Image (cartoon, grey):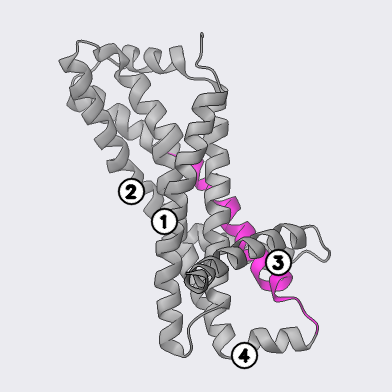
Amino acid sequence: MTAPLTRALTPVGRLFSLGVDVVVNTFKPPFQLREYIEQTWFVTKVSALPTALFTIPFGATIALLLGELTRQFGAQSQTGAGSVLAIVQQAAPIVTALLIAGAGGSAVCADLGARTIREEIAAMEVLGISPIQRLVVPRVLAMATTAVVLNGLATVVGVAGGYFFNVIVQGGTPGAYIAAFSSIAQVSDILVSELKALLFGFTAGVVAAYRGLNPPPGPKGVGDAVNQAVVISFVLVFFLNLVLTTLYLDLVPPKGS
């Protein structure tokens, strides 16, 4: 029983250790600024448009569903509050993280995996160059930074899409939609959304880097590592979202309470 448990927990410990190493090496000079900027631009380029396009139907679905539910209970005036808060606190950071992990994370994992099987990583270590500081830190920070920026984009697009479908399609009242949201929303809702995006992007970056640095043997192993990185990132994102949402609802009192 001990051996299977050890084999199962060893990758978890290594993944956590890599995350700690990324944080520590972030503050060690020299910082790879050029690599960071290039990776940030790349991740933004491959993730921005899919994030915006995916958030529109996501926000519309939430608005349509809540609009129908509130109509059944005679509380149409609260549609704006429910839909906008759902988009800001849940939909926007999750959508952003999933697309960052799927588009940017897969590219990062494939790049590091190819370097690993070509023994470039081993050569850097022989030369005394830290692959964590030189390659991993800029990529992980790029994914975290991009996630924060794209979360703002996803929030705006999702709220606009929800507003359009609720007001135009379902015939809601524009003033009531906005007033309901402003009556219960608070600054902490935006802050926790951005915090989620930062942690989700960081997690997806660490997972992609870990699988890229530890791929199965051969070129096929790189493809397998990419698939594993995306799946693991998705699972961790939803788990972290559950933990952060629970803590936020317990620690931050609702507006007006």
| Mark 3 lies on residue | 34
| Mark 4 lies on residue | 119
Q: Earlier in the sequence, mark 1 or mark 4?
A: 4
Q: Position of residue 231 (x, y in %)?
A: 40, 63
**Whole-number angstrom distance, CA of label 1 to CA of label 4:** 29 Å
Foreground disc of the pair 3, 4: 4
Horizontally, is 245 left or right of 187 in the view?
A: left
Horizontally, is 144 left or right of 94 in the view?
A: right
Foreground disc of the pair 3, 1: 1
Query: Do labels 1 and 2 touch, CB within 8 Å?
Result: no
Which of 176 and 74 lies nearest the eye of the viewer? 74
**Whole-number angstrom distance, CA of label 3 to CA of label 4:** 23 Å
Q: Earlier in the sequence, mark 2 or mark 4?
A: 2
- Magenta range: 128-154
Q: Position of residue 171 (x, y in %)?
A: 19, 19
Q: Look at the picture and state if 113 lies above or below 231.
A: below
| Residue 45 visible in the shown view | yes
**Whole-number angstrom distance, CA of label 3 to CA of label 1:** 29 Å
Few, some or many C-alpha atoms within 10 Å of disc 4 (few <14, some 14-19, many ≥20)?
few
Foreground disc of the pair 1, 2: 1
The kind of residue on which mark 3 rests is Arg
The kind of residue on which mark 4 rests is Glu
* Dominant SS in magenta: helix
| Mark 1 lies on residue | 234
Q: Secondary structure at mark 4?
A: loop
The kind of residue on which mark 2 rests is Phe
Query: Do labels 1 and 4 touch, CB within 8 Å?
Result: no
Few, some or many C-alpha atoms within 10 Å of disc 2 (few <14, some 14-19, many ≥20)?
some
The kind of residue on which mark 1 rests is Phe
| Mark 2 lies on residue | 54
Look at 45% across and 75% down and name the residue there.
225
Q: Position of residue 85 (x, y in %)?
A: 41, 27
